[in-house]
Image (cartoon, rainbow, N blue to C red):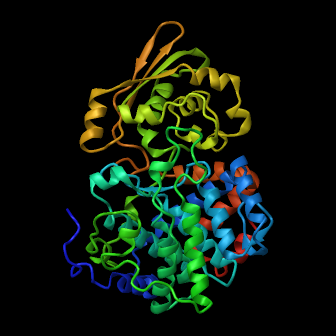
Amino acid sequence: MTAPSSADRMETAVTAAVSRFAASFDGAAIPEATRAKARTHILDSLGCGLAGASTGMQRAILAATRLEARPGPCRVLGESEGFGPVAAAFVNAAAMNALDFDDGLDDENGRGMGHPGASIVAAALSACFERTVSGADFVTAVALAYEVNNRLIRAIQPSLARFREVYGVCQHQAIGAAIAYGRLIGLDDAGMENALGFAGTFASVPSLRKYNWERRPLITFKDFLAPAAEAGVRGVSLHRAGLIGAKAVLDGPSGLWRMLGSDQFEPERLTDGLGANWTLGFNTLKPYPACRWMHTTLDAFEGLLAAHAIAAEAIDAIVVHTDAALLRDFMDAAPLSINDAQFSFPYTLAALALRLPRPHWYDDAHMTSPVLKALAARVTGRVDAEASELMSGQRRPAGRVDIRLKEGTQHSSALVVDAPGGVVRPLAAGAVAQKFRANAAVALGAQGAADLLALIEHIETVPDLGAALSGRL
């Protein structure tokens, strides 16, 4: 597909249709399966944020935010303090992504499709501390925001040639953040469109190619989803102040798709079946706190550990078999930061072998552990022909693993093609709640995590979510 030669196909009032859906769609008409999936992603996002709040990186982000943000009513995860809605959304979104444990959307043509929960749930969270928001309304706002978010990133996918030049993973998420926050604040159709105009033009530039892949450490805001949350909430706030944003920001040959670096746009993917066909079923959940492109290999390795009861101290060598591009980007055996570690096969395989609790993989004690470092140093990589074929054709990041034991035995996995936590291999029943309990306990303790879990599991019956959360965060 190429960009159209005229503006006719583009002038379709997409922004107006999206704004009307976001502001006015009846929440009671959202299917229960979609609402249930939204509740799951709310739970997962909150848990990831509570675990991520304690990282050194997040503490630095919080300290920097304190220098410029006044105290306010919107709670910061893992803290007793709060900020105004914009700063709180920024900090909370950063916490939700700090461990790279947060959700995603099934890849299309092997391209990252974002981490929507961090931007959307963080933005919605700000609203419920500003005014009375019922749990049911919160779920509605989140579901509507996910729907537009998922459709938008698919509608603006660039050609392969443009993708190789420039791409942004989460920059589009400013729109979903504005929808979640704006819906709960009570914007009408016109107000939503104005807020989206601000949010879209505040979006960060597409910067995937400048993540410091060749000059580590990787950048702190690796997918810029915290600035996306900030942009969305700020857009609504500026609308409420009476200011004017870009009109029809999604429409036309100069619309958001072009601003975010794409060379093509399929507006029908945003609007066709909007409100009838729901996409939250395609959003993914992570069993490992690491880049999802590594999850097939991590799953293959974990399967071997379990099948053969392999202890870390028995391992002599680990060999990763995958595509050359993954070996190029993910074989840093001595990561300098937690972001580097999240993109490191050697580090994450060592963490799995040592059976480290997943919310604590990147604790300072583990990042500096001589035992973990020694095991990571024994991980090597080899190009796998089948994985390379899958990557060059369907751009599917497959992987397999060999483990050689000190006593001479070698165990080899099959090639894993589909990552757990997606449509093909959803997480087992109860896995998300178990993950939440472990994550939330980092900040709240086991009982606090259990109390918050019970609240979110019955979120749609809560009359004032902000008040209920204030006593539990």
Q: Vertical placement of 58 versus 92: above or below?
A: above
Task: Kindly identify the residue that appears in the image at 52 percent across and 89 percent down.
Answer: 244
Give the x, y percent position of residue 178. Answer: 52, 76
Task: Kindly identify the residue that appears in the image at 26 percent across and 74 percent down.
Answer: 268
Q: Vertical placement of 326 versus 243: above or below?
A: above
In-image side of 473 versus 18 (left or right): right
Task: Kindly identify the residue that appears in the image at 40 percent across and 83 percent down.
Answer: 21
- Residue 239 location, quadrant: bottom right
Give the x, y percent position of residue 207. Answer: 47, 55
User: In this orientation, does residue 159 appear?
Assistant: yes
Q: Vertical placement of 392 versus 209: above or below?
A: above
Depth check, front residue: 45 or 39: 45
- Residue 122 location, quadrant: bottom right
Depth check, front residue: 237 or 287: 237
User: In this orientation, does residue 458 appear?
Assistant: no
* Tally of numbered tags: 0
Q: Vertical placement of 28 versus 383: above or below?
A: below
- Which quadrant of the figure contains the C terminus? bottom right
Give the x, y percent position of residue 24. Answer: 44, 88
